């Protein structure tokens, strides 16, 4: 397409409500105009490239139009874990290798591209973590102002990415929920600003995660199961939607089993799954545990969790909670045996696979969602003992002690 159109070249995209099925042409809104439900961005007659492809080679199957903002996202390595699993068939998808260090770049690329194509004047998000880092980067790249709303007293280390990307950081005198509502209000009262707070508020962002599934299929053919760290769960939704496209086009013969992974200290979706419930309740207990970037209690938007639960059940998947001890042990083994590190929320995918391994078909893929330096695992690092030596200790002795530790 060479000429910009009134809908930015998004003419094959429809926004469809996942609750009441109402649909409309693409716009910057975050919810259904009839019932307020969350939206899915669906592309009519999606065309997928043959074989391995770069991110925007999937454009004919994504809700993007004339504008394609990029920082080289997607195309992340698929690495076999042959030392940990000598029988083979277990892989990690290295999502930490995206430009801002997490899988969020796929969603931000598509959502910011669509926002600019649809005439947005700016983007806003409430986040302190991976999403703010990613959205602020793509907004800068698109030449759009970006407001990051967060609770007053957020540690400065959490703001480095956003501030360096030129985002306007607004510290709300209240909790994160107040910041969340402020982002919502800004977009509601200024319809040319788009709210890219994570969760299901951006159907473009959610849809972009299908590219993970398409890349897996291009490399592996059939995919047996996928371990996906989830807060509210839009990455899981996008991956299952991507698998549905592959199934409809006859590129795979069966749906992969999706496994939604949460930390035991904040596991509203896994709890609902275990209880056999049809809906997810918000997590009213204290939020605790290592995997900070998936600790989402869903307060005020538990229906997002219900959307993910339905996706999991619809694909005969599982939801599982893993403990800090299981994450810590998985982290140490993955680093020691494979030379691979990631943030605790990502490592939770490996901890979950170890629990469910016997039930899951191969090839099995663990989505390692973010870089280890995104969320420095102080609790794990505390266990990694150094060897104290004096400056004049004989080198033979240093090597002997190092080998003792290695062979542990
Ligand atoms: Zn609706």
Image (tube, rainbow, N blue to C red):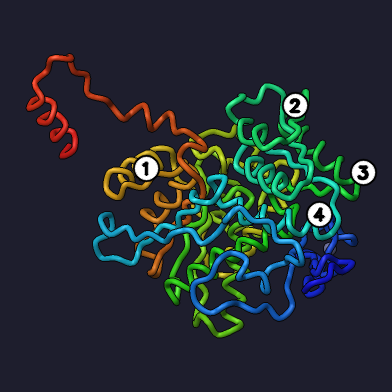
* Residue drawn at point x = 64 percent, y = 63 percent: 310
Q: Local crowd at mark 2 within 10 Å, few (<14), some, or many (≥20)?
A: some
Q: Residue 140 carries which label?
A: none
- Residue at which label 3 appears: 189
Q: In which quarter of the image is residue 205?
A: bottom right
Q: Name the residue under label 2.
A: 171
Quarter of the figure with the C terminus: top left
Asked whether disc 3 touches disc 1, contact meaning CB atoms under 8 Å apart, the reply is: no
Give 3 or 152, whichever is nearer the viewer.
Answer: 3
Q: In this view, does 346 lie above or below 406?
A: below
- Rendered-image quarter of ligand 1: bottom right
Do tag 3 and tag 2 residues touch (Cβ < 8 Å)? no
**Quick one: SS at disc 2?**
strand
- The numbered disc on residue 30 is 4
Please tell me which residue is depicted at 79% across the width and 47% down the height of the picture.
195
Spatial separation of the CA atoms under disc 2 and disc 4 = 23 Å
Specify the quadrant that holds the N terminus.
Answer: bottom right
The quadrant in which residue 73 appears is bottom right
* Of the image marks 3 and 2, the number of the one nearer the N terminus: 2
């Amino acid at each position: 397409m060479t000429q910009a159109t009134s809908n930015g070249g998004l003419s094959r995209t429809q926004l469809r409500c996942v609750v009441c099925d109402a649909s409309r042409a693409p716009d910057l809104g975050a919810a259904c105009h009839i019932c307020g439900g969350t939206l899915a961005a669906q592309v009519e007659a999606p065309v997928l490239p043959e074989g391995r492809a770069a991110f925007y080679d999937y454009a004919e199957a994504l809700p993007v139009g004339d504008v394609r903002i990029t920082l080289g996202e997607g195309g992340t390595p698929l690495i076999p874990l042959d030392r940990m699993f000598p029988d083979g068939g277990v892989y990690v998808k290295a999502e930490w290798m995206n430009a801002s260090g997490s899988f969020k770049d796929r969603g931000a690329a598509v959502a910011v591209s669509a926002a600019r194509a649809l005439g947005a004047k700016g983007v806003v998000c409430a986040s302190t973590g991976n999403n703010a880092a990613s959205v602020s980067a793509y907004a800068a790249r698109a030449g759009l102002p970006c407001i990051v709303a967060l609770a007053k007293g957020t540690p400065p280390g959490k703001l480095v990415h956003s501030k360096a990307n030129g985002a306007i950081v607004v510290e709300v005198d209240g909790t994160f929920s107040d910041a969340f509502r402020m982002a919502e209000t800004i977009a509601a009262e200024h319809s040319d600003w788009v709210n890219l707070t994570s969760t299901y508020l951006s159907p473009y962002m959610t849809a972009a995660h299908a590219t993970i599934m398409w890349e897996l299929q291009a490399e592996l053919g059939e995919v047996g199961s996928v371990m996906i760290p989830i807060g509210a769960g839009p990455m899981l939704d996008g991956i299952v939607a991507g698998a549905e496209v592959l199934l409809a086009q006859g590129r795979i013969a069966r749906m992969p089993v999706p496994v939604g992974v949460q930390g035991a200290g904040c596991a509203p979706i896994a709890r609902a799954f275990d209880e056999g419930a049809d809906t997810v309740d918000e997590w009213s207990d204290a939020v605790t545990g290592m995997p900070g970037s998936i600790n989402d209690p869903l307060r005020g938007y538990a229906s997002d969790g219900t959307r993910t639960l339905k996706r999991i059940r619809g694909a005969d998947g599982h939801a599982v909670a893993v403990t800090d001890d299981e994450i810590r042990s998985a982290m140490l083994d993955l680093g020691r045996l494979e030379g691979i590190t990631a943030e605790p929320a990502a490592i939770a995918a490996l901890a979950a696979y170890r629990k469910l391994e016997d039930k899951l078909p191969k090839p099995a893929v663990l989505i390692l969602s973010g870089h280890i330096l995104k969320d420095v695992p102080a609790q794990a690092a505390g266990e990694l003992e150094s060897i104290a030596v004096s400056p004049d200790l004989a080198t033979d002795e240093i090597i002997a002690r190092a080998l003792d530790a290695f062979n542990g």
